Amino acid sequence: MKQLWVRLVAALFLFLSCLSNGNAKMTSTFVRSEWPSTDIPLDNQAFAVPKGRNAPQQVHITQGDYEGKAVIISWVTPDEPGSLKVQYGKSEKKYDLTADGTVSNYSFYKYKSGYIHECLLDGLEYATKYYYKIGDGESSREFWFQTPPKIHPDAPYKFGIIGDLGQTYNSLSTLQHYMESGADAVLFVGDLSYADRYQYNDVGIRWDTWARFVEQSTAYQPWMWSAGNHEIEFMPYMDEVVPFKNFLHRYPTPYLASKSTSPLWYAVKRASAHIIVLSSYSPFVKYTPQWTWLKEELKNVNREKTPWLIVLMHAPIYNSNDAHYMEGESMRAAFEKWFVRYRVDIIFAGHVHAYERSYRISNIQYNVTSGARYPIPDKSAPVYITVGDGGNQEGLAGRFLEPQPDYSAFREASYGHSTLEIMNRTHALYHWNRNDDGKKVPTDAFVLLNQYW
């Protein structure tokens, strides 16, 4: 054990010594030479429909319980309801277990969805590779996934963080680079398909293409979903006025496991992390259901078992970009004091189509009549990171406010993704990787020290 600790410390010092300079209060001068920001054409291979009559497509999995021993598998059959069963087991081509699911469909304007299947696989063993099979006969398809290690304060785990992805060539670059990262699961900070930029039946069609586009990852590892503004899809001109309709029909979350009353906010534990997902576009002021739930969920966090406390939201609380500036202020006023009190380690957000990392700061002293007017250094506060740079057709947010605020550590208008690799209860390694014209370029990195330990 002592030798392992010595090697870990040595590795951490080596990592620190390799960090590039300029990662402290810096606005990057990199200028992105963008690939096309238009959506990939419908006939592109990225959206290919799997072969076979009524073959399952748009396969994706997410965590299915509170502690990582279950997954929810979702898929669509286009023509008719297919088999509701998932066959699975620990050996390839040998499926000795079966679970039954459900099927549903819905309409959006005149678009009729395919048949959406959902199946819960529970009672799984930790740290185990499972193979699974869905569909009928020659049209069936096979995939696999890996369950996380048993919950333990020193359980290592690597998360990817992606936001505002869309379905452009830039989106494809982000997805492919993420898949090379070796991460085990994705924390997705909202704005999935950008289908709401279309009208009428094209909205539903672009939800289908996006789900086929990301299947190359989502069928093999869990993506933990949070909803962004592009999931609201309030479209009265089409008589579609139920918010989040497409998202809620297609992307289930294990909200009941954490006693949430809505799929839009929930919590899961995974390896050594406790992850809380919030909804920036649902009521969250005092006494609302989300406010009440978060108050209780934070009390349930046991840092002795899950030392890493991570929060996901869509609209960033701290943002020095002209785009969406101060949009997160109301949530900051509602929740920041809790984030500091419970010593949240890191908060990931999207929404702004650029990258930005903050120092540990807070503005809990401020009120409308007195107190400090600006954020100040606070060792108990989270690090705030905006990763709204997946690659969608709206393009980059290239206008940062000047001068750069003291709370802003590093910012750049480019596309990319992040990884957070938890090493043990005290240290995690963080990277933001820029997509430099199709190449993955590590651009921002630091060692994150755990707030509790």
Image (cartoon, rainbow, N blue to C red):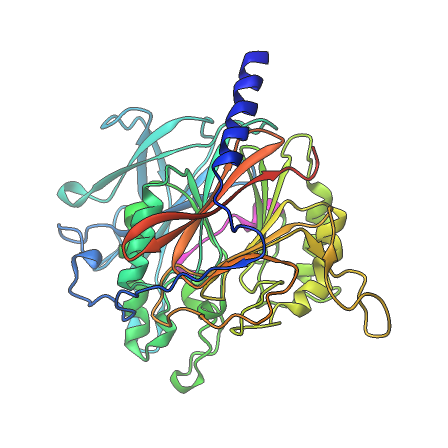
Residue found at the far bottom of this picture: 237
At horizontal 50% and vertical 29% (from top left) the residue drawn is 14
Q: Nearer the viewer, residue 15 or 149?
A: 15
Q: Nearer the viewer, residue 401 or 65?
A: 401
Residue found at the far front of this picture: 21
Q: Is residue 256 magenta?
A: yes
At horizontal 38% and vertical 83% (from top left) the residue drawn is 238
At horizontal 32% and vertical 51% (from top left) the residue drawn is 175
One can see residue 247 in this view: yes
Q: Nearer the viewer, residue 425 or 89?
A: 425
Q: Is residue 77 magenta?
A: no
**Up-down: is 182 above or below 432?**
above
At horizontal 43% and vertical 32% (from top left) the residue drawn is 147
Q: Quadrant of the N terminus?
A: top right
Give the magenta-colored segment's residue range.
249-258
One can see residue 76 in this view: no
Res 132 → quadrant: top left
